[in-house]
Amino acid sequence: MQKVTDRDLLLVIDVQNDFCPGGALAVPEGDAIVPTINRLARDFTHVVLTQDWHPPGHASFASTHPGRQPFEAIELPYGTQILWPDHCVQGTPGAAFHPDLDIPHAELVLRKGYHPAIDSYSAFQENDRKTATGLAAYLRERGFGRITLCGLATDFCVFFSAIDAAKAGFATTVVLDACRGIDRDGSIARALDEMRAAGVTLL
Ligand SMILES: [Zn+2]
């Protein structure tokens, strides 16, 4: 990796109990990356954490739509949405960060997915592709130019966040051994191809 400077920021995506083995929407080996992320974070002065943070009855939950099952796709007013098991409900243990995540110097916890009717995979823009989270403005105002991403899941929240970071003009890197994916129907391979095509550096 290039030398980390004061313009660098590490963005740690959704390292929460529900995305780890035993959680409601477990990513295979999701917990295995926690020590790697802790080590990576020590190299960065500036770290931001994201936290998926849904109200009960969120539009992305299959349980909200009678007759629907998790992992089915549904049409919502903003487009196609995959339905998930109830996960990362605000204030529940599943929404908490993994207990071994050890990044006390993180400067901001950015919560996303709190609008009842809109999901948010990306740390920058919600799934309607219109509603901004405010993160791009925050990072610009803080003077960061290079964003390094890690966390869960490679093919969803890390992927969409990396694409949006690159689109917003940040030099963007994803550290793959500090990520794990869900991999539905080849979604990891597709995500890697699309990130490369968008100019994201994959390490
Ligand atoms: Zn979610």
Image: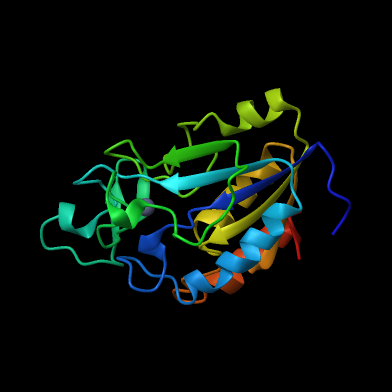
Relative vertical location of residue 180 with respect to residue 48 in this rendering, above or below: below
Relative vertical location of residue 132 with respect to residue 65 in this rendering, above or below: above
Give x and y (percent) for residue 172: 73, 49
Image quarter of the N terminus: bottom right
Give x and y (percent) for residue 164: 61, 44
> Which quadrant would residue 188 be assigned to in this image?
bottom right
Give x and y (percent) for residue 8: 77, 42
Relative vertical location of residue 139 with respect to residue 122 in this rendering, above or below: above
* Residue found 49% across the figure and 57% down from its top: 15
* Extreme residue toward the top, this view: 141
Image quarter of the C terminus: bottom right
Give x and y (percent) for residue 47: 65, 43
* Residue found 55% across the figure and 39% down from its top: 124
The answer to whether residue 171 is left or right of residue 165 is right
* Residue found 44% across the figure and 74% down from its top: 184
Can residue 94 be seen? Answer: yes
| Color theme of the render | rainbow
